[in-house]
Amino acid sequence: MSQMTVPFYGHVRQYHNIKAEIDKNLQEVLESGQYVMGPMLKRFEKEFADFHGMKHCIGVGNGTDALWLTFMALGIGPGDECITTVNTFFATAEAIWIAGATAVFVDSDPRTNNIDPSKIEAAITGKTKCLVSVHLYGQCADMKAIRQIADKHNLFVVEDNAQAICARGNGFEIGELSDAVCTSFIIQKNLGTFGDGGAVVTNNAEIDRKVRKFRNHGSDKRSVHSYGFNSRLDDLHAGVLSAKLKHIKEWSDLRRKWAARYSAGLAGAKNLTLPYEAPGNYHVYHLYVIETSRAEQRDPLLDYLNNNGIDAKCHYPIAIHQQEGYPWGKQARIVGGVPNSERNAACCISLPMFPELTEQEVDCTIDKLLDWDKAQS
Ligand SMILES: *Cc1c(COP(=O)(O)O)cnc(C)c1O
């Protein structure tokens, strides 16, 4: 067989599959003459709120802004502490810092890689305001446990849902157990536009009102301004997202299908740990992340895959506290050590994962991994 190459993303395949629907919405926006805060944005905000079964959706410029504008709306700022994890995309902590608050990190669960709720209470102080749960790789964090802790200590809960649109937890929906859900629509996310975008979804009218003003120069009435910024979701992006939202369930099922195929094919590999799907969860596999048994194996395996045409990657090889210069003079603290997050960073490899994969591509990746596994001592 000639050498096959397997890409990591399928953006253009996806565009071709639903080109007519996307182009129709883009044309509608172009012909309307309303490109910023226009009717297409309104339509998508309604669709996205309905999709969550929630009352409000505010489109913003990106996922990072969704998070920090939410923190601002909750009144979180200097002197306040937000508890989260170090094994996430950098923006989770970045947003806490932009708001002026302190990031307090606790360890992740060794199997799901989501925040370990049993580590949270030790990190709570009189300054703690918010628990920030990341649904890493497309699987919900243990929101029931997180909500319980938040209620006991009177804390806000914000879901960083950049990676898990359409996921479900064990007996709960995203948004059900938090104050707000923050999402990113950058192209590589499960619901991605051709560029940057983000949204806040909430049932809280006060968060809605504030984020809506913050994103538009502190204005909800023409020429009248209070404190604010510029972070809007453009109508062209809203049009793309409105077209794509209709497919997100079918795409999530496809991601799960490829994940199941990887997991069945790799089940016998002695040197790999496969993703763990917690009972009762509907994991949407934003990323299919395996771990090598030993940290020394990771970089060689990644090189081997890349040299053999498989565009595997790492999410995230450098945890937040391991970044050079951390914490850059910002307020940050680790409570109780983060050995599980450090293992995750050292051993993780993300395999190609997108709805438009083919069986041949998945099987080719599996075969290469099994060859590598056999060659390990
Ligand atoms: C992508 C991502 C973000 C940030 O989203 P942007 O749109 O790139 O600003 C935040 N948190 C997590 C977990 C992400 O994966």
Image (cartoon, helix red, strand yellow):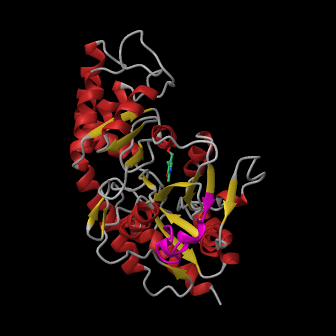
Find residue 87 and report its image quarter: bottom right
Q: Position of residue 284 (x, y in %)?
A: 35, 61
Q: Is residue 250 above or below residue 33?
A: below
Number of on-image labels: 0
**In percent of the image, x 60 and y 82: which residue is there?**
293
Q: Is residue 302 visible?
A: yes
Q: Is residue 18 visible to the viewer in this orientation of the structure?
A: no
The single residue placed furthest to the bottom in the displayed view is: 377
**Camera-side residue of 89 and 240:** 89
Q: What residue range appears in magenta?
A: 104-123
Q: Hey, which quadrant is residue 77 in on the image?
A: top right
Q: Is residue 223 above or below residue 168?
A: above
**Is 267 drawn above or below residue 107 in the view shown?**
below
Q: Point out the residue furthest to the top here.
A: 223
Give yes or no for residue 76 being in the magenta stretch.
no
Q: Work out which quarter of the rendered image holds the C terminus and state it.
A: bottom right
Q: Residue at x 26, y 14 (%)?
A: 31
The residue lying at 30 percent from left, 20 percent from top is 38
Magenta stretch contains residue 105: yes
Image-based side of 363 in relation to 305, left or right = left
Residue 326 on image: x %, y % = 74, 53
Q: Is residue 208 above or below residue 283?
A: above
Of 309 and 85, the residue lying toward us? 85
Image coordinates for residue 270, horizontal then vertical, percent: 53, 88
Tell me the quarter of the image containing the N terminus: bottom left
Measuring 51% from the left and 23% from the top, which residue is drawn there?
227
- Name the main secondary structure of what is drawn in magenta: loop
